[in-house]
Image (spheres, rainbow, N blue to C red):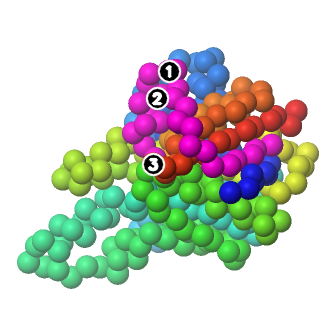
Amino acid sequence: MHTLTAYIEGIGLRGPGLTDWPAGLAVLKGQTAYQYQKTVLPPPASLPAAERRRCGPIVKLSLAVGHEAVAAAGLDASGLPTVFSASGGDGNNCHEICEMLASDDRQISPTRFHNSVHNAAAGYWSIATGAMAPSSVLCAYDASFGAGLLEAMTQAVVDNTNSLLIACDTTYPEPLHKTRPIPDEFGVGLVLAPQRSARSLARISIALTSDRADRLADTALELLRSAIPAARSLPLLRALAFREAAAMVIDYLDSSRLAVEVTPCS
């Protein structure tokens, strides 16, 4: 694989103890001690009332980090191509459907059904923003953040266009949680551009490598990174927080990882 290079224009973040990118930046730089607090998902104010009532955690999380990243980049979300990546879909909705299928009444509501598909978040995003640009939806289990980053970077480079990556994971209720024990909601949004602009935060280059993935020195953050696929982004976010040239290896597949280099633009 050749090296892909683009520019990071905006960042969105939400997870346990990380309420947004400014709060996450302070924690990752060590200015604020990390304290675990369950992720709070804001109401999706950009959706019409009917859709707000129907959507689940994966949609609320995707909208939160997507809107934050786009606002930071100063772009119009309606014309921005998107890449959605998650290791699973709406865990609560999946649980409810499984309970219904295991009962005597197997009539699944249309709302349950349309929220069960993997591209539900992309659909709600288009409703919330009026987006008509292309949208890609990926699932690669624990490799989902790496797969999404590769897709968004490829889109920016090959199509010579800005691209928004939204990588999110949400929890499953028991008994599914025992099989897929994601401990909390975590999401990250990255706006990528093919050329540097006045708003560019950093230049990012990625290539495949067989080297081992980097770990975080902070025990609590490392537990978060290893437990939630979308949180595999934390080493990259930490490098961006320090605004220094850095190289790191991010988890991807069992046989290959992502060698990432970032250089601040200011």
Q: CA distance from mark 3 to mark 1?
A: 24 Å
In the image, the segment drawn in magenta is 203-229
Q: Which mark is residue 254?
A: 3
Circle 1 sits in a helix, a strand or a loop, which is it?
loop
* Amino acid marked by disc 2: Glu
Q: Quadrant of the N terminus?
A: bottom right
Mark with earlier residue (3, 2): 2
Amino acid beneath label 3: Asp
Residue 7 coordinates in the image, percent (x, y): 80, 48
According to the image, label 1 marks what residue?
A: 218
**Residue found 46% across the figure and 59% down from its top:** 140
Secondary structure state at the residue bearing disc 2: helix
Give the alpha-carbon distance from disc 3 to disc 2, as whole Å: 18 Å
Residue at mark 2: 222
Q: Secondary structure at mark 3?
A: loop
Q: Residue at x 18, y 72 (%)?
A: 100
Instruction: Mark 3 vs mark 2: give the one in front.
Output: 3
Quarter of the image with the C terminus in it: top right
Marks 1 and 2 sit apart, C-alpha to C-alpha, by 6 Å
